[in-house]
Amino acid sequence: MKEADIVRKITQWLKNNEFWAVKMHGGPFMMMGIPDVLAIKDGKAYWFEVKTPRGVPSKVQLYVMQQLRKHGCVAEVVRSVSDVVKVMEQRLDKHPTSD
């Protein structure tokens, strides 16, 4: 499966689960290393660098994700919707909601 197909499935899952989600498009005015997908829910930003099963993030991508985490964001490398679900489950376990 191509990375673009994985991105499309991930953004659709996020939108179906009440996240605001967008694919970040690189270009001449975009900072290098920005993760592929930005999702926001309940005031929390989630960044996902999407890779195919054999894909490896670059040093710049890893550095940018480290900086995003330093500023309170979730930033992870994912390869499938199930990886995104795991990230969300881990975050919910760490920060349970009180209703």
Image: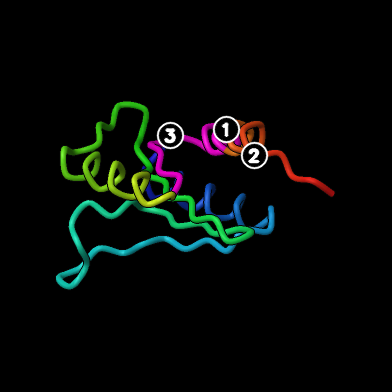
Earlier-in-chain disc, 1 versus 2:
1
Q: Which mark is residue 95?
A: 2
| Residue under the image location 57 percent in, 64 percent down | 20
- The single residue placed furthest to the right in the displayed view is 99
Instruction: Relative to 65, say whether 41 is above or below.
Output: below
Span highlighted in magenta in the image: 73-87
Is 61 left, or right, of 49 in this rendering?
A: left
Give the Cα separation between the discs numbered 1 and 2: 20 Å
The answer to which of 82 and 74 lies nearer the viewer is 74
Looking at numbered disc 1 in the image, what kind of residue is underneath it? Answer: Ser
Q: Position of residue 99 (x, y in %)?
A: 85, 49
Q: Secondary structure at mark 2?
A: loop
Q: Splitting the image into 4 quarters, where does residue 90 fall?
A: top right
Residue type at mark 3 is Arg
In the shown orientation, is residue 40 left or right of residue 75? Answer: right
Q: Which mark is residue 79?
A: 3
Mark 3 lies on a secondary structure that is loop
- Give x and y (percent) for residue 76: 40, 38
Q: First in sequence, mark 3 or 2: give its number.
A: 3
Q: Quadrant of the N terminus?
A: top left
User: What whole-number distance in Å separates the C-alpha atoms at marks 1 and 3?
Assistant: 8 Å
Which kind of residue does numbered mark 2 sit on?
His
Badge 2: how crowded within 10 Å, few (<14), some, or many (20+)?
Answer: few
